[in-house]
Image (tube, rainbow, N blue to C red):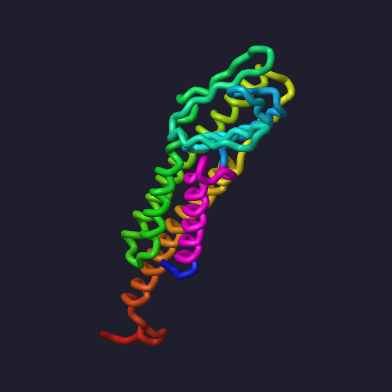
């Protein structure tokens, strides 16, 4: 593969892997890398204290109360129940958070594609391209799950109170950027391999073509 395509493909894969890795760490280990975030302004409670904000991640969630922030390492597929001062209640079930575990699976595939992209063998680089597209497919699924979780939480919070702010977290957008990078990486490797194949065919034709001059046409056998 040409050097320009090789370097750009490796860079795209490396950036996608790093971003997906950061997203996969998520809450409660990386508190800034949440998928969905709700600013509650003290209108909700999950126990005895009022909640000012809560964040939903892959492996758990964090709740900001008047006494400070508390993060819970529940593992994937957790559930969270909130209630307002009027007695209204909403539950974010495990069916909405269980699918978030697709993120680390996509991260693993991106890492495999990255390692294979360093090879100079055409077959291995082709497999690297296919793995990149497979990682992109899983990232699409992960991003769709992120969108579904955000839409569900926003709808439920809107039913509970009109004065709430549900936004997408950094992990949401980094997943989207990783998807774009994986698609670029896969296309770069494919186009690079096709270009090398065409260049090889052209060189073979030039080597096999006899070099004849103009006057050689009139030579008698």
Q: Position of residue 21 (x, y in %)?
A: 47, 50
Quadrant occupied by the C terminus: bottom left
Q: Is residue 219 above or below residue 183?
A: below
Which residue is located at x 63 percent, y 34 percent?
64
Which is more toward the observer, 7 or 76?
76
Which is more toward the observer, 45 or 101?
45
Question: Is any part of residue 141 visible from this angle?
Answer: no
Judge whether residue 59 is colored magenta.
Answer: no
In the displayed orientation, state which residue is furthest to the left: 221
Which residue is located at x 36 percent, y 85 percent?
216
Q: Position of residue 100 (x, y in %)?
A: 47, 35
Q: Position of residue 198 (x, y in %)?
A: 40, 64
Question: Is any part of residue 76 visible from this angle?
Answer: yes
Which residue is located at x 55 percent, y 34 percent?
56
Which residue is located at x 65 percent, y 28 percent?
51
Question: Magenta stretch: dominant SS?
Answer: helix
In the displayed orientation, state which residue is furthest to the right: 163
Q: Is residue 131 above or below residue 54?
A: below
Which is more toward the observer, 155 or 60?
60
Which is more toward the observer, 127 or 93?
93
Left or right, residue 117 beside residue 140: left
């Amino acid at each position: 593969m040409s050097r320009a395509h090789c370097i750009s493909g490796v860079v795209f894969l490396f950036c996608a892997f790093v971003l997906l890795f950061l997203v996969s760490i998520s809450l409660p280990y990386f508190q800034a890398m949440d998928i969905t975030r709700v600013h509650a302004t003290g209108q909700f409670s999950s126990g005895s204290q009022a909640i000012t904000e809560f964040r939903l991640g892959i492996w758990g969630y964090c709740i900001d109360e008047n006494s400070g922030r508390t993060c819970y390492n529940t593992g994937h597929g957790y559930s969270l129940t909130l209630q307002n001062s009027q007695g209204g209640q909403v539950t974010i079930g495990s069916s909405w958070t269980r699918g978030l575990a697709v993120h680390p699976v996509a991260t693993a595939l991106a890492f495999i594609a990255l390692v294979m992209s360093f090879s100079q063998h055409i077959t291995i680089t082709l497999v690297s391209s296919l793995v990149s597209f497979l990682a992109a497919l899983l990232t699409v699924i992960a991003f769709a799950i992120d969108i579904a979780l955000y839409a569900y939480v926003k709808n439920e919070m809107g039913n509970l109170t009109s004065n709430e702010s549900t936004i997408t977290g950094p992990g949401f957008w980094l997943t989207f950027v990783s998807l774009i990078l994986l698609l670029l990486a896969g296309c770069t490797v494919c186009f690079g391999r096709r270009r090398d194949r065409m260049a090889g065919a052209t060189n073979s034709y030039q080597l096999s073509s006899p070099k004849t001059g103009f006057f050689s046409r009139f030579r008698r056998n």
